Amino acid sequence: MFSYNRLLFLIDHLIWGILVLVFVFFIFQSEYFLTERNISNILTAAAVLGVLVAGQTFVLISGNFDLSTESTLGLAALVGIWLIVPAGPTTFGGGIFMNPYLSIICSLSMGALIGYIIGCLITYGNMHNFIVTLAALLVIRGLMMAFTEGAPVSGFNNPSADVFYWLGHEKAFKLPGLGKISVAVLATGLVYIVCHLILKHHKFGRELYAIGGNRDAAEALGINVNRRIRQVYMLSGLLAALGGWMLAGRVVSIQSNLGETFIFTVFAGAVIGGVSLQGGRGTMLGALGGVLLLSTIDRGLNLMQVSVFWIKVIQGSVILVAMLIDAQRVRLKELSIIATSEKK
Amino acid sequence: MKILELKNISKSFGAIHALENVDLDINPGEALGLMGDNGAGKSTLVKIVAGNFSPTNGEIFVAGKKTSISNPLEARNHGIEIVYQDLKLCNNLTASANVFLGREINSGFGFFSRLKHTAMNDRAAELFGELQSETRPHDVVERMSGGQRQAVALARTRLSDPKIVLLDEPTAAISIRQVAGILARIKQLKETGHAVILVSHRMMDVFEVCDRVAVLRRGNKIADKPIANTNPEEVTGLITGALEKA
């Protein structure tokens, strides 16, 4: 029997169906696709993206944007390594030789602090979140470049950088069929579990949905909206710094453009996963689906030896298709509201 | 004893005086109709009682004690529940989530607390039953009729046992059949000893359920008299300015 509700349910969970389809398609396209090594690569590539998308999902659900996370990620990675390596050529560090655990705490708190400052500018300064985070994107990137004068900071061959490699590179254990699971993948999995619990089962998450759905109502019912917005940006900054830690362990040497243009992929992941740009709608599970789909497509096309330029074209098209499906979802919802109200 | 007393309340927004020295009081078990044309200051007065605005001047007494209401949560803690004109519902949330918004039932403390979904849904279902509404706790508010939305907003006021219920234009956006339901609900509140303030444009509603009517015009209270001593024509005259004072 046809029912709008059933159709809506299908569309809401379409991401997983598409993921399976895309997966099967690539299996037939490349013999290397279903190898442990490739699966492990897909998951590792999804790890850093996933952490940023998780942060962005909180921000989007509260009805805001955070464009600055790619720069925060870069700066956090840079500062983390800079604090532990010697000064001068080849490494270009600060020569501070900080304890690596301490440097990670520094870099994570810096991420949270950047987020908090952005939140304060938006709430106390009464400025639009899009503009504030756009400015932050430029300012932080500029700081990074000015700070290093364009030289790459490298943790190569430095025993202190092991903590970074542990999160970025180390394999935790081997799973049959999935290959070696890296620490980064485990960490991202954990992040998603915690974020899911916060969003679905904690007052904080419930309030974010309310703020994104009807800010005015949330305020009238005594929710401290501005405080929540500051906290959301703090969370986003913290997760961006965590992503920076992961990436620092993977790329060994931090260029001052680390993470540049990453934000487009982050938004794409969230939107493909069904997180609404209008706020108030989306789930962590959906966002995770979006992340996995993007990295699967990326790896698959690479294996098919599609040119980098075409990969961009295809990624752009995937975003358009996702938005098209989303627009149909909104239309269907309206139809189903009319259908149910006429039944009464 | 007066359950709520406003004394000399004034509110200015820059050069605009939205309210000037308004006195208002209400007893338990009494329903007060608050009337006035658009821009007369009704909404400002509602927002002051609800804690959305603080008055520029004047004092508020709840149950004889001087209080300041600086935010909506404080108003609730003083036993004042508001049903706003636009209902303040989040369309993206379920009925039950809307009822409990800002007052969720949790287990545990702080960061480690967890929403008790089942407890909230059960309680919401009970409340909808008491209101004789067909609203189901799991339904998303987006897909509800005007009456069901109203039921969600009304259910909020029943979470605690409020002393004062303030309804801002509750009958403006619903069908005639549902208006009767709201009016019955107001009578029921009166009988159980609650003070009700009904802000409305609809003369019929005010004359059906209220004991007293107060009229605001351009930020001043120009009349406050028992329903028995007045009639719709007189009140209309007061609202429009055809009659200078009662």
Image (cartoon, coloured by chain):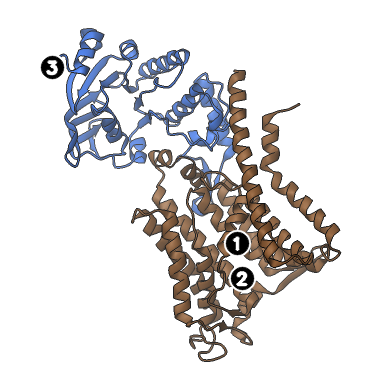
Chain colours: A brown, B blue
Find residue A341 and report its horizontal and vertical position in percent.
58, 22
Residue A290: give x, y in percent of width and height: 66, 53
- Where does residue A93 sit, x and y in percent of width and height? 51, 85
Q: Residue at x 85, y 57 (%)?
A: A28
- Chain of the residue where label 2 is placed in the rendered structure: A
Element under disc 3: loop
Query: Rounded to the nearest whole Å, what is the CA distance between mark 1 and mark 3?
Result: 67 Å
Q: Chain of mark 1?
A: A
Q: Is residue B208 above or below residue B32?
A: above
Q: Which residue is mark 1?
A: A51
From the viewer's side, name the closer residue of B201 and B212.
B201
Q: Residue furthest left?
A: B244
Q: Nearer the viewer, residue A200 or A79?
A: A79
Residue A342 in sight in this render: yes
Determine the secondary structure under disc 2: helix
Mark 3 residue crowding within 10 angstroms, few (<14) / some (14–19) / many (20+): few
Amino acid type at mark 3: Glu
> Picture quarter containing residue A295?
bottom right
Looking at the picture, which amino acid does disc 2 mark? Met
Residue labelled with disc 3 = B244
Q: Return the residue at label 2.
A: A246
Asked if marks 1 and 2 touch (Cβ < 8 Å), the reply is: yes
**How much space separates mark 1 and mark 2, taking CA atoms?**
10 Å
At a point 63% along the width and 38% down the height, the residue shown is A328
The vertical placement of B214 against A312, above or below, is above
Label 1 crowding class (10 Å Cα cut-off): few <14, some 14-19, many 20+?
many
Precedes in sequence: disc 1 or disc 2: 1
Q: Nearer the viewer, mark 2 or mark 3?
A: 3
Question: Can you tell which of label 1 and label 3 is closer to the viewer?
Answer: 3
In the rendered image, which quarter contains the N terminus of chain A?
A: top right
Horizontal side of B182 relative to B120 (left or right) equals left
Give the amino acid type for the residue marked by disc 1 in the picture: Val
